[in-house]
Image (cartoon, rainbow, N blue to C red):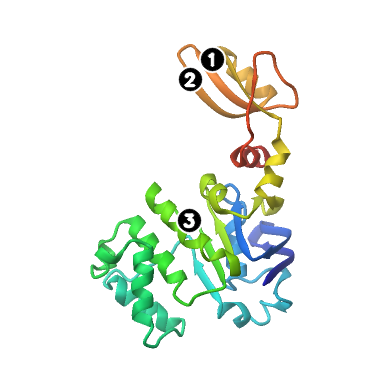
Amino acid sequence: MKLEIHNLSKKYNKGKYGLQNFSLTIENGILGLLGPNGAGKTTLMKIIATISQPTEGNIKLDGVDIAKEPNAIRKILGYLPQDFGVYPNLNAFEFLEYIAAMKGVGGSNLRPRIEQLLEGVNLMEAAKKPIGSYSGGMKQRIGIAQVLLNDPKILIFDEPTVGLDPEERVRFRNLISDLANDSIIILSSHIVSDIETIADEVAIIKSGHLITKGTQGDVIDSVKKKVFEIEIDSSTLGDFKEKYLVLNTIRKKDKILVRYISDEHLKGAVDCIASLEDAYLSSTR
């Protein structure tokens, strides 16, 4: 499968753009979307899911324009929006049966499928309790389960790990990693480690524009041999920030350990192995 995004723009009131001249090709595997708040990640996902229409440009799934033929993607789509809602009086079984009916999924295999998904997101023990009694993280996990109900070939997750503890984030990553070989998975997250752990490719978005896209190695190469750490006096931090891109600081009594990006090697600085987070912060600041 191939999703081809051509010169996509989304214009809102007063001339504000959510996306502008955005082009991207997505194939089987996991694409991690990184970008600050308001970058356009959610706008892009809504257009791919055919919930929103672009102002200009198009998206083609294996050559089919999904704006003109939305069912081409809807019948194989699983989507978890950032503002996923639930019916608080239903329990997990009832809710997933309702969503299954909405998606046209049924038959004798439905109940075992729901049980399998609830096991996968670690909700079997709470499956008969009203969803209204669930924590935020549990509601997020029922949202992840509903995405997978119809065995989709295109999966879109908008901030899926919000509210999940570290153990549940690992469980989620393992769950979708198993699906990546023959599916397109688009994962948006503010948590760089979630992207770093499982994404085959990374796309960084800022202000509605695509900044870079490639394998993690390709993206990290942009800051390779440019990341350093150095201890400086706390009184000089302000001046240091004016000269260099500071990624992180750690206070050590009267000194500060600074991780920064530079084209030059300062005396006393230590070379660091560049990370995806370094490349992300460098490209979006």
Q: Looking at the picture, does residue 179 appear above or below residue 246?
A: below
Residue at point 38%, 49% (across, down) = 167
Q: Secondary structure at mark 2?
A: strand
- Looking at the rendered image, the disc whose residue lies closer to the viewer, 1 or 3, is 3
Q: Between 58 and 232, which is closer to the camera in this rendering?
A: 232
Mark 2 or 1, closer to the camera = 2
Which residue carries the number 2 mark? 251
Does label 2 or label 1 sit earlier along the sequence? 1
Q: Amino acid at mark 3?
A: Arg
Q: Residue at x 75, y 27 (%)?
A: 263
Residue 284, position as x, y percentages in the image: 65, 42
Q: Amino acid at mark 2?
A: Arg
Q: Which quarter of the rendering shows the C terminus?
A: top right
In the rendered structure, are the residues bearing label 2 and label 1 in contact, judged by CB atoms less than 8 Å apart? yes
Give the image location of residue 96, x and y in percent: 36, 75
Element class at badge 3: helix
Instruction: Name the disc covering residue 234, or none.
Output: 1
Q: Quadrant of residue 246?
A: top right
Q: Is residue 42 visible?
A: yes
Q: Residue furthest left?
A: 129
Residue 16 vs residue 111, the one in the foreground: 111
Q: Residue at image x 65%, y 47%?
A: 216
Q: Which residue is mark 3?
A: 173
Q: Secondary structure at mark 1?
A: helix
Q: Residues within 10 Å of mark 3 (few under 14, many from 20)?
A: some
Q: Residues within 10 Å of mark 2 (few under 14, many from 20)?
A: few
